[in-house]
Amino acid sequence: MSTASNVPAPDGEDQGRQWDRVAAGWKKWWRTIEDAARCVSERMLDLAEVGPGQRVLDIATGIGEPALVAASRVGPAGRVVATDISSRMLDIARERAAMSGLANVEFRQADAGRLDFPGGSFDAVLCRWGVTSLPNPSNALATIRRTLAPDGAFAAAVWSAGADSRPLASLAAAVAREMFDPPAPRPQAPSLPGSAEDTLEQAMIHAGFADVRVEEIGLALEWVSTEACTQYILDVSPELVALFAGKSPGQRAEYRQRLAERLRPYVLGDGGVRIPNMTICAAGRR
């Protein structure tokens, strides 16, 4: 849930409304999203050494990840608290937890930039693709460190700024700019200057984290057709949902056609679409 570096970030209330509007889309596509992203969640938990009986905080959990993976790993003796700014996203997360029979996870609506947990509350803190959406990531990292118990661990995933990081988001934004400039959504990128790897590492060190590790992880999203792929991005992107609210059916159809043409390099022999992505994972200890 990050915003482009040269676009003013909406305040917490506005961000909540934006994500509320696409919650139904995330519910529709959650299996597609998590089939691809589970490897990132698992790696984050590995880096944070999350284990049975631990107390875990998941910030900007969205529809419940990696909170639900963490809840399975900490077991009945452990506890997971997951926060998000969108109440509708959290409703979906609660549904998924109930479907999975997980009773050791609690979901709270909260602004990630204003966490008020007592110091030392958690053995591990997780944040998958949420750190760079905060107005002041450096302050947020310092707050996260304070919530950790001694020797507790923080693990985060962020998107890098390059087009190869999230090709679909980049293509969708490019077509929108061609058709509707201005305004147009832009690819999401770290709100901290510099490369995602170097900047996140330095920000964590500056916040006081020790033993900071940074690595790249590949993941691939798959759809049965270009039509499904274009529908996906129109359903889950807050920027595109806002952009198309006032557009005609003809404009929407043209956008779909143009985006489908850009997707040709990713079309498989059976007509399906597979798009590789690259994310950055980082972890450090209090």
Image (spheres, rainbow, N blue to C red):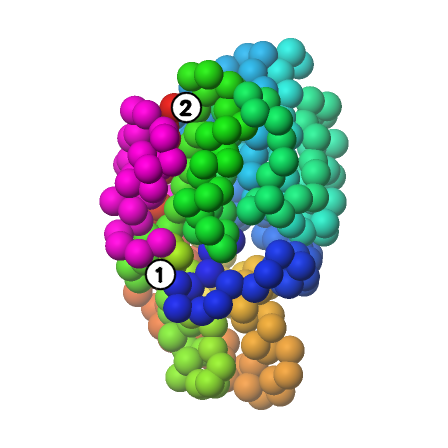
Q: Is tag 1's residue or tag 2's residue first in the polypeptide sequence?
A: 1
Marks 1 & 2, CB-CB < 8 Å contact: no
Across and down, in percent, residue 154 comes to: 44, 29
Magenta region, residue range: 192-221
Q: Amino acid at mark 2?
A: Arg
Q: Residue 77: which numbered mark, if any? A: none
Q: Residue at x 49, y 47 (%)?
A: 130
Q: Is residue 152 above or below residue 162?
A: above
Q: Position of residue 157 (x, y in %)?
A: 41, 41
Residue 286 appears in which quarter of the rendering? top left
Mark 1 or mark 2, which is nearer to you? 2
Viewer-side residue, 3 vs 165:
3
The residue under the point 64% across, 21% down is 79
Q: Secondary structure at mark 1?
A: helix
Residue at 51% x, 19% y is 149
According to the picture, the residue beneath numbered tag 1 turns out to be 167
Whether 29 is among the magenta residues is: no
Q: CA distance from mark 1 to mark 2?
A: 34 Å
Local packing at callout 1 (Cα closer than 10 Å; few below 14, some 14-19, many 20+) is some
Amino acid of disc 1: Pro
Q: Residue at x 46, y 20 (%)?
A: 152
Asked which secondary structure carries label 2, the reply is loop
**Is residue 198 positioned above or below 178 on the image?**
above
As rendered, which of 190 and 270 lies closer to the eye?
190
Residue indicated by mark 2: 286
